């Protein structure tokens, strides 16, 4: 179970991130700076394994949410620098939640309950169908409207299972 934390804001800069002295992996890692509009700034290190929802291309000026593991060690620098696990570009047509979902399909923060329908697409990060129930897993949930109950309930459009690496 990953302890997902997030930061939401506008991309202010994208540049190459250098990982070593010998140039190995050059161009494969990106450094994305995100500012939240209130003066807070976060730098995300984006690797080839970072999952971009809908495989979108991001650019300076885009509104995004970056998810990272709150239990991972980070350098004590300002602005904070996190290894991005999942990046989501804002869309008016869908909501996204990245979290661990229990055996009852309730998020670890207790804010969202999933009601899976026969039309809910459940896939792996490589786009292949996931053949099991998505309970007790780290999930990327893409959904639309929710109820106003606590927890809010929704029937997701798509669920992406983040299998352990």
Image (cartoon, helix red, strand yellow):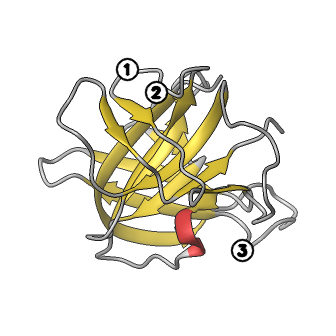
**SS under mark 1:** loop
Please tell me the numbered disc located at residue 27: 3
Give the label, 3 or 2, closer to the camera. Answer: 2
Q: Please give the residue where the numbered disc 2 appears in the rendered image.
A: 107
Residues at marks 3 and 1 touching, judged by CB atoms closer than 8 Å: no
- Compared to residue 61, the image places residue 135 above or below, namely above
Residue 158 visible within the image = yes
Residue 61 place in picture, x, y as percent: 28, 76
* Number of marks drawn: 3
Furthest residue in direction left, as rendered = 38
Q: Which mark is residue 57?
A: none
Please provide percent x and percent y for residue 161: 69, 45
Residue found at x 72% / y 74%: 27
Q: CA distance from mark 1 to mark 2?
A: 5 Å
Query: Residue at label 1?
Result: 110
Q: Is residue 6 left or right of residue 98?
A: left
Mark nearer the N terminus (3 vs 2): 3
The quarter in which the C terminus is drawn is top right
Secondary structure found at label 3? loop
Relative to the observer, which residue lies in front, 124 or 51? 124
Position of residue 36 relative to residue 90, above or below, is: above
Are the two marked residues, 3 and 2, in contact with CB atoms closer than 8 angstroms? Answer: no
Q: Residue at x 51, y 34 (%)?
A: 99
Residue located 75% across and 66% down the image? 127
Name the quadrant of the N terminus. Answer: top right
CB atoms of marks 1 and 2 within 8 Å: yes
Determine the secondary structure under disc 2.
loop
Task: Note whether 140 is above or below 113 in the view shown.
Answer: below
Which mark's residue is nearer the viewer, 3 or 1?
A: 1
Q: Residues within 10 Å of mark 1 (few under 14, many from 20)?
A: few
Q: Answer with left or right where residue 145 lies relative to residue 56.
A: left
Task: Return the x and y of residue 55 as percentages of the image width and height.
Answer: 59, 73
């Amino acid at each position: 179970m990953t302890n997902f934390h997030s930061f939401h804001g506008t991309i202010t800069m994208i540049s190459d991130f250098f990982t070593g002295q010998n140039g190995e992996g050059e161009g494969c890692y990106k450094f994305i700076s995100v500012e939240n509009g209130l003066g807070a700034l976060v730098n995300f290190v984006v690797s080839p394994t970072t999952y971009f929802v809908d495989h979108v291309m991001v650019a300076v000026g885009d509104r995004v949410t970056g998810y990272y593991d709150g239990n991972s060690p980070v350098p004590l620098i300002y602005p904070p620098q996190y290894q991005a696990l999942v990046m989501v570009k804002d869309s008016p047509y869908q909501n996204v939640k990245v979290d661990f979902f229990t055996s009852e399909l309730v998020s670890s923060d207790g804010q969202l309950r999933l009601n899976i329908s026969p039309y809910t697409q459940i896939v792996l990060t490589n786009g292949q169908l996931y053949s099991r129930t998505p309970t007790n897993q780290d999930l990327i949930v893409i959904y639309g409207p929710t109820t106003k109950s606590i927890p809010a309930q929704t029937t997701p459009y798509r669920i992406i299972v983040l299998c352990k690496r």
